[in-house]
Amino acid sequence: MKITAIESLQWAEYPRLLVVRVHTDQGITGLGETVDKVPGAKGALHGTVAPLALGQDPLDIEGLWRFVMDNIMYHGYAGAELRALSALEVALWDIMGKRYGAPLYHLLGGKTRDQVPTYNTCIGFGSVQDYAAWHENAGSLAQSLLDEGIKAMKIWPFDRFSENSFGQYIGHEQVEAGLEPIRQIRETVGREMEIGIECHFRWNRPSIERIARALEPYDILFLEDVLPAVYVDEIKLIAQRTSIPIIGSELLMTRWQLREWMEKHVASILMTDPVWNGGIGETRKIANMAEAYGLPLVLHNVAGPICHAACMHLGAHIPNLYFVESVRAFYQTYFPILSDHAPVVRDGHLPVPKGPGLGVSLRPEVLEREDLSRQISEGPGLAEGRRSMGDHWSVEEIR
């Protein structure tokens, strides 16, 4: 089997998503996806990754991943190129599952659980305006989530106060205002709802420590991305000074960037994103490393139906899973428009898709939409059969 074409799809209505289709000479097509910073990822996919992947065997996932990674690492890898490679790699697993008629979790080694625990990130989209809801009355939103079987939620009530001081100082009145939605949740539903707090690395350490002290009486599930992920020692100090678990960070790409966090025991919970970090195989390797350190893992999942399906399969497989993030404002609105995947939460958990590969397909009509931008790379590629390391070889050498 060979890769004959690599196609990217983007819809104007969903500008954050880049869907990738990998076509083969046996008629099997795999689906992948990445999210955010789409222009860069699309350029990297067609300009750098596709010429290396075309003509290669899509079932040699590890070999092809390492070949592409060796080449993009040659000039620094952890941005657009890795998002493009992640989307490609997810599609390769989908091809393998379709080739052998097996769901992704079987290819990974089977399930450790039948359903996947989730928390809702309270973003708004379309008819589901969870972001506006937690600003208006977070208690009512919490009740709405509970009524749909969702038992954990994530909000970011302190972010808006960081603008004036560039995150250098938060006053007592601002802290009190940030606590208001948390109080509303506790007053309305008590401790039936778990609350995670996203910090978006907007504060310095003294400010985050003030916020953490104020949050401690409210039995918070975690504090996420308290500082930029590169400030390893500072984040560890915060973790040592609060009883709230610190979590991070989807901004660390590949096992190599997460390694220092594990070695230094920076946080009690790790987080990674399969459509940013290198893909499904890389996520499993990160999970294995985390398990060796006794650390639970959260899968960051704020993309579309393809990423969601990949996270469900990984979540079913990974023994040390803590939660998989999900966004009901996405899966209740545009997931069913783009795909045949429309998950429903039951008792705090999401189901694993059925069927071969990822178990999700695009609806045919989305390929005919007027707002679709499509780009395709096809042909023999530049590197068929090559496994050279680095970027030292040339087209002339290949020929």
Image: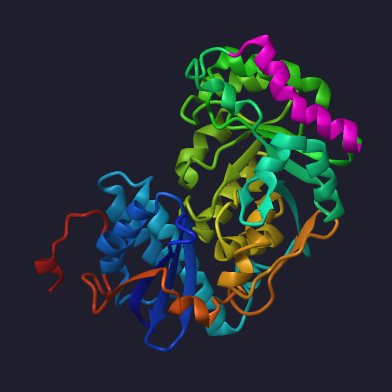
Camera-side residue of 199 and 205: 199
- Which residue occupies 36% across, 50% down? 80
Residue that lies at the very extreme toward the left in this rendered image: 396
Q: Magenta segment range?
A: 170-189
Q: Residue furthest bottom?
A: 26
Q: In this view of the protein, which residue sits in the foreground, 55 or 127? A: 127
Residue at left offset 68%, top offset 69%: 342
Q: Position of residue 115 (x, y in %)?
A: 77, 62
Q: Quadrant of residue 56?
A: bottom left
Q: Identify whether 277 is placed above or below 269.
A: below
Picture layout, residue 195 above or below residue 243 = below
Looking at the image, which residue is at 36% across and 81% down?
2
Determine the residue positioned at 54% across, 42% down: 250
Q: Position of residue 70 (x, y in %)?
A: 31, 54
Residue 194 place in picture, x, y as percent: 80, 39
Side of 150 relative to 44 (left or right): right
Identify the main secondary structure in magenta: helix
| Residue 182 is a magenta residue | yes
Residue 255, placed above or below residue 229: below
Image spot of residue 302 (x, y percent): 58, 52
The answer to whether residue 291 is visible is: no
- Residue 47 painted magenta: no
